[in-house]
Image (cartoon, rainbow, N blue to C red):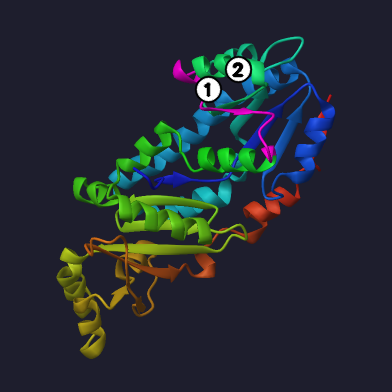
Amino acid sequence: MSFSLFQRPGAIVFLDDDPDYLEMLALVLPRHWHLRLFLRPYDCINYLQQEPPFWEADAWNQQQLVDQWREGRPLIPQILGYWSKYTERYALTRICVVDYSMPAMDGLQALGELVEWPGSRVLLTGQADEQVAVNAFNRGLIDQFIAKQTPDISHRLIDAVEHLMATPSARHAQIWRATLTPEQNALLRVPSVGRDLRDLASKRWVEHVVIGDPFGVLGMDASGRVSWLQLEPVSGLSDLAELAEAEGVKGHALEDIRSGRKLADLELRQALAYGSPPELTPAFAVGREETLLGALFNIPSEFCPDSANSYARWLARQEPRSVQG
């Protein structure tokens, strides 16, 4: 599936025995990344070895949301509550980038100590180490490798990290896939649908979750503003129009729904127990196959997490970038 069912920011760890190189990374890598920079392998290993229980707790919290949905509780308010409460989810390290050639312990040995840590692994190599990296990649020990002598190494690192950041853990994907019907899952696997959703999400949100009941994507931007991308198969427009009619939508508005020109946020309001009249917004095609429509709705501010708990505010509270050790 080319579009991630679950996406959020996370920390990125760099381990290198060259302090000047780490200082350079601190200066040139994007400011919206949360970085931790280590000189000593044992400090880095010790830090990451503390994380697996927190990863487990976070996965358990997400699984609880789905379990309670199965018992009848709407997903959307549960996800909003999770985002509001568990702000330290941003501190979990998503990616570890390690230099291969270090005197005390080489990069593969360091990564080999991280048996339980579930994040992605990137190896930085010298020219003489490239075959070692190829073998490690083929054996599944690392997710990517990058030669340090690569021209414009910072841009190559940024591309690699952003690619891995867009790839969720298999466990998170499994948790949220359970809310999708087989038909919804099949629609999301259409390549053009995945591309359109990925492009839209990258422009609007830092964090999102795909759910099937109702069908759509709940996303939050760095400032804590939340919006809902309603997804509607073209085959379901008649049912949506019937539901809208039952809620008092009439005339041209009802015809706009039947024809796919607009979608109504009926299921969103039902999930939030929001009693105001339905809102209709213009629909747009998702993918080239013309089988899926989308429409964006802003979540009312009273349901959104406190902006103090947004990713931007959380990041601003972290210590300035510095080399550890």
Mark 1 sits on what residue?
142
Tell me which segment is drawn in magenta: 137-153
Q: Is residue 93 above or below residue 46?
A: below
Q: Quadrant of the N terminus?
A: top left
Query: What amino acid is at disc 1?
Result: Ile
Q: Residues within 10 Å of mark 1 (few under 14, many from 20)?
A: many
| Residue closest to the eye, 28 or 279 | 28
Q: Residue at x 65, y 21 (%)?
A: 127
- Which secondary structure, mark 1? loop
Question: Does 148 lie within the magenta span?
Answer: yes
Q: Nearer the viewer, mark 2 or mark 1?
A: 1
Marked residue nearer the N-terminal end (2 or 1) = 2
Query: Residue 141, position in %: x, y?
Result: 51, 18
Asked if the residues shown at circle 2 and circle 1 are in contact, with their CB atoms under 8 angstroms apart, the answer is: yes
Q: Is residue 44 above or below residue 246?
A: above
Query: Residue 64, position in %: x, y?
Result: 40, 39
Mark 2 sits on what residue?
111
Question: Does 84 lie within the magenta span?
Answer: no
Q: Quadrant of the C terminus?
A: top right
| Residue closest to the eye, 324 or 76 | 324
